[in-house]
Amino acid sequence: MNRVANISQQFAAHNYKLTPQREAIVRVLLDNEKDHLSVEEVYMLVKRSYPHLGLATVYRTLELLCELHIVQKMNFGDGVARYDLRDDDHVHMHHHLICNVCGKLEEIKDDWLVELEARVAREYGFSVTDHRLDFKGTYNSCQKNGCKGDKDCRAVS
Amino acid sequence: MNRVANISQQFAAHNYKLTPQREAIVRVLLDNEKDHLSVEEVYMLVKRSYPHLGLATVYRTLELLCELHIVQKMNFGDGVARYDLRDDDHVHMHHHLICNVCGKLEEIKDDWLVELEARVAREYGFSVTDHRLDFKGTYNSCQKNGCKGDKDCRAVS
DNA sequence: TGCTTATATCGTAACGATTACTAATTATTC
DNA sequence: GAATAATTAGTAATCGTTACGATATAAGCA
């Protein structure tokens, strides 16, 4: 099934409409699924197909998508919120590798935490609905090509 | 060894001085190790022992402590940066449980990710220097006492 | 169709956390 | 003890985000 149509249905199911502006934003997210776009980036990209769109609408729409669990708002410590499409089941979050040298942000699409979540439930009486796992470090390939000193104090691990 | 003295040495080792202001801030962090204080909270607490201290100094000192890997700047999606003392070896980060109902933030002091980090190294050629693992969900005890609908779209998983 | 009401958008002002900057203060060096 | 460097205080500026009033679009109904 068409993903836009799918999302449109989810909007309808919650009495929201997929307006042209909202659809343009959703399409940008789908077309850039690999990236973790900031509001400003989404704004720039949407302007290509919808030049008249206002920044506040981007903020509002992303918040709405977040409420519908279609996207996930995240914070990688660079001072701006970033948004990530969730999996279709809206449950599992993927993990991230963040390279200190080249700055690349890679996704691990698997869910490696099933076991640990069971352990949390067992040992802490805590049932997990969502999680976040980021690894920071360096790719071996980056390591070779000289590594500038890491004075980096950005938030988020 | 006294922890303040220990930190003082680390300052000295990097040609920084542990001024009275900085020491007052460090003591607040040590005295509230369980919490994840925001800048504003640290500011309030330090004012008790050092009423004249300026807010900018808190910002600068926390950044410095971060650079020295004594604290870790984190972001739990409530709009302010929070700071967490690192373990003495300055390597392992603990994990977090965040309850959707009562809002409590609990720490898991173990490092459960040793295995997964090995896997990342193996499968992705990526050597981890740091990580972050947060679980969001509900305590069983909170679950019972009625759970308000979760419309929460805060950043960070 | 025309009127009414609700929903969504636009542009911008307001807000709040953080950073940048200047002057004043304290420590260090010669 | 004067000159230099490091640190702090206080506040102005910045920047991401949110709030607000006015306008526009869609839905419901006679």
Image (spheres, coloured by chain):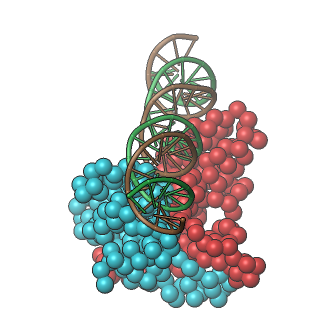
Chain colours: A cyan, B red, C green, D brown
The spot of residue A67 in percent (x, y) is: 51, 68
Q: In this view, does B70 lie above or below B98?
A: above
Residue B156 makes an appearance in the image: no
The spot of residue B112 in percent (x, y) is: 53, 80
Task: Answer left or right for A41 relative to A134.
Answer: left
The spot of residue B63 in percent (x, y) is: 52, 47
The spot of residue A122 in percent (x, y) is: 65, 88
Quadrant in the rendering for residue A141: bottom left
Quadrant in the rendering for residue A102: bottom left
- Please count the marks in the image: 0
Residue ID at (54%, 72%): B134
Residue ID at (43%, 67%): A17
Viewer-proximal residue among C18 and A8: A8
Residue ID at (59%, 87%): A119
Viewer-proximal residue among B3 and A66: A66
Task: Answer left or right for B144 relative to B16.
Answer: right
